[in-house]
Image: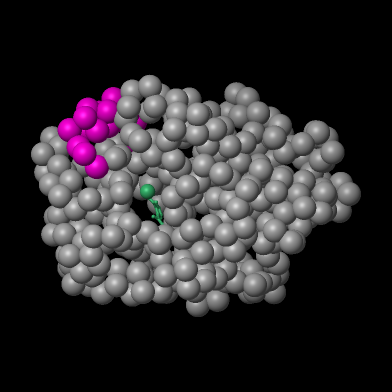
Amino acid sequence: MLAIQRIVLREIRLALKEPFRISSGVVSDRRICLLELTNADGTVGWSECVAGEQPNYSAETIDTAWHAITEWLAPRVLGKPFDGPELVFAMLDRNVRGHNMAKAAIEMGCWDIAARQRSISLSRLLGGTRDRVATGISLGIQANPDALVERARAAFSSGYRKIKVKIEPGSDIAFVRAVREALGASVHLMADANSAYTPADADHLAQLDAFDLIMLEQPLGRDDLVRHAALQRRLATPICLDESITDVDRAEDMITLEAGRIVNIKPGRVGGFTVSKGIHDVCQRAGLPVWCGGMLESGIGRAHNVALASLPNFSLPGDLSPSARYWAKDIVTPEWTMDADGMVHVPLDRPGFGVTVNLDRVDDITTRHSVLTCT
Ligand code: OSB
Ligand code: MG
């Protein structure tokens, strides 16, 4: 039984080691919203809202999520007992359109509490079947192909099992070619456009077929399922959808329309773990692989992603880089690490998501704070 009594919202500021540039914008200092949820029995769970500062990836931002959680979503769970975390998404979703990132933050915190109550790992509670998950790196857009090659080489030699390069018009074909030539034919290489292209670019994008990419992520707009289907017919490279897949129905539409052959699941984007599991299951039934994407999360959001990535149909490496790739110092202990084979270990022997939140460090970098309770 869960009955959330208190949610502490915090905004922290965490500087990335280097700016991360995608087709729609750049981020160098992350503003991250953290949730600390306290259950009636005293069990505490944590979560992170993946919304960014600007509405360039999704319509939501940290400020809209803060508002949605405070005004509409937290009141739906605070002081309202319910049987289990699989019920939370429906409680939050009824007559509240959108705001999936805000919903996900509350929902995932409830899963963490439920795992801790049972003294089992979050991975186990979710139905995870692996003790290690394969890790890829997502490399931001660089000034020139040489700078990208340098980062791709370093990533490959440190063990990463998939190299993803961000692309946009003007920084695409030559950049991907340079990385493929530098790393050789056997490396799992892919590109992510974050919606930077239109159907008029189909012939241009077809040049990427020459580089044997394992997938091309989100070339077109997020509502462009029909247009993605037409583009997929034109390309040999499998299309993977990220921004477009906001719920289980959109994943089913993708499958029906053949708008893509792979899904990047970010639990924070789709409203949490219940929806993520639903997308995982429909893809599995259709024979399509999924993988776990990232949103430059702190060690808390990363913990949720690692747990999800341990499910069976997460058969491709996720965007789950170790803490040290992003931050001088993470906010969890131990920090997330990757072994020499590019694997992150799932903390199966610890209750909940398996790392400890370093509260002193969180307090040091907190810039905004709000306590929500039952009224
Ligand atoms: O499209 O996958 C994306 C980061 C911010 C916004 C969108 C995306 C990304 C990444 C980063 O690719 C992956 C990571 O967290 O390492
Ligand atoms: Mg993406």
- Residue 177 is inside the magenta segment: no
Q: Is residue 8 visible?
A: no
Question: Image point 10% across, 39% down: which residue?
Answer: 203
Q: Is residue 133 left or right of residue 1?
A: left
Q: Farthest residue toward the front?
A: 186
Tell me if residue 44 comes above or below residue 143 in the rendering. above
In the image, is 249 to the left or to the right of 164?
Answer: right
Closer-to-camera residue (190/114): 190
Residue 286 lies, in percent from the top left, at 45, 28
Name the spot of residue 52 as percent of width and height, x first: 46, 53
Residue 264: image quadrant is top left
Between 103 and 236, the one lying in front of the other is 236
Residue lying farthest right? 41
Q: Residue at x 57, y 59 (%)?
A: 132
Q: Is residue 232 magenta?
A: yes
Which residue is found at the position 44% from the left and 33% from the top? 287
The reply, left or right, for residue 375 in relation to residue 49 is: right
- Place of residue 338 in the rendered image (x, y in percent of width and height, measured from the top left): 52, 69
Provide the major secondary structure of the magenta segment: helix
* Residue 78 position by quadrant: top right
Left or right, 241 with reference to 133: left
Q: Which residues are magenta?
A: 222-237
Could you tell me if residue 284 is visible in this image?
yes
In the displayed structure, would residue 10 be above or below residue 247? below
